[in-house]
């Protein structure tokens, strides 16, 4: 049951836009740094880390996509042992 609940929460978080969350980062950082024993403070900490999780996930995703595209481009350029189709003209 917990696993299903967490998966549902993850789906909802994945639907969030990082650009929209970026504006909330400072707000929840300030709330988190202003410690008190309230439930609101606890929620602020969770929200702050959710925002950071989305940012980190996107950073890792973008780095992996970039790396994959660079590897694909370099493998298409020239494979080892390929001889270019050029001939010397005098």
Image (cartoon, helix red, strand yellow):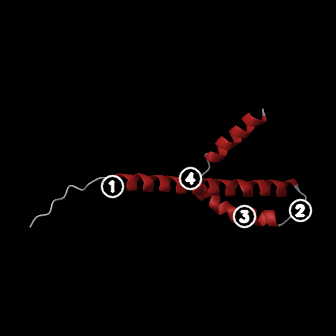
User: How far separated are the C-alphas under marks 1 and 4?
Assistant: 27 Å
Mark 1 or 4: the one toward you:
1
Where is the C terminus found, in terms of image quarters?
A: bottom left
**Residue 24 occupies quadrant:** bottom right
- 9 w.r.t. 57: above or below: above
Which residue does the image show at 83% across and 58% down from the upper left? 41
Q: Residues within 10 Å of mark 2 (few under 14, many from 20)?
A: few
> Mark 1 vs mark 4: which is more N-terminal?
4
- 78 w.r.t. 2: above or below: below
Residue 73, given in percent of the width and then of the height, sits at 39, 54
In the picture, measured across the screen, residue 75 lies left or right of residue 65, that is left
In the picture, measured across the screen, residue 86 lies left or right of residue 23, that is left
User: How far separated are the C-alphas under marks 4 and 3?
Assistant: 26 Å
Mark 2 or 4: the one toward you:
4
Q: Disc 1 marks which residue?
A: 78
Q: Disc 4 marks which residue?
A: 61
Which residue does the image show at 50% across and 52% down from the upper left? 65
Which residue does the image show at 83% across and 66% down from the upper left? 34
Mark 4 or 3: the one toward you:
4
Q: Disc 2 marks which residue?
A: 36
User: Which numbered marker is on residue 27?
Assistant: 3
Which residue does the image show at 74% across and 54% down from the upper left? 47
In the picture, measured across the screen, residue 33 lies left or right of residue 22, that is right
**Which residue in the rendered view is the most extreme toward the left?**
90
Residue contact at pointers 1 and 4, CB within 8 angstroms: no
Secondary structure beneath disc 3? helix
Residue 42, given in percent of the width and then of the height, sits at 83, 55
User: How far separated are the C-alphas under marks 1 and 2?
Assistant: 61 Å
Secondary structure beneath disc 4? helix
**Residue 63 occupies quadrant:** bottom right
């Amino acid at each position: 049951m917990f696993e299903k609940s967490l998966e549902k929460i993850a789906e909802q978080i994945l639907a969030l836009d990082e650009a929209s969350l970026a504006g909330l980062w400072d707000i929840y950082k300030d709330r988190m740094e202003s410690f008190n024993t309230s439930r609101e403070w606890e929620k602020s900490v969770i929200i702050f880390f959710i925002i950071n999780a989305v940012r980190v996930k996107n950073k890792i995703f973008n780095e992996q996509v970039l790396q994959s595209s660079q590897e694909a481009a370099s493998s298409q350029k020239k494979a080892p042992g390929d001889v270019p189709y050029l001939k010397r003209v005098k």
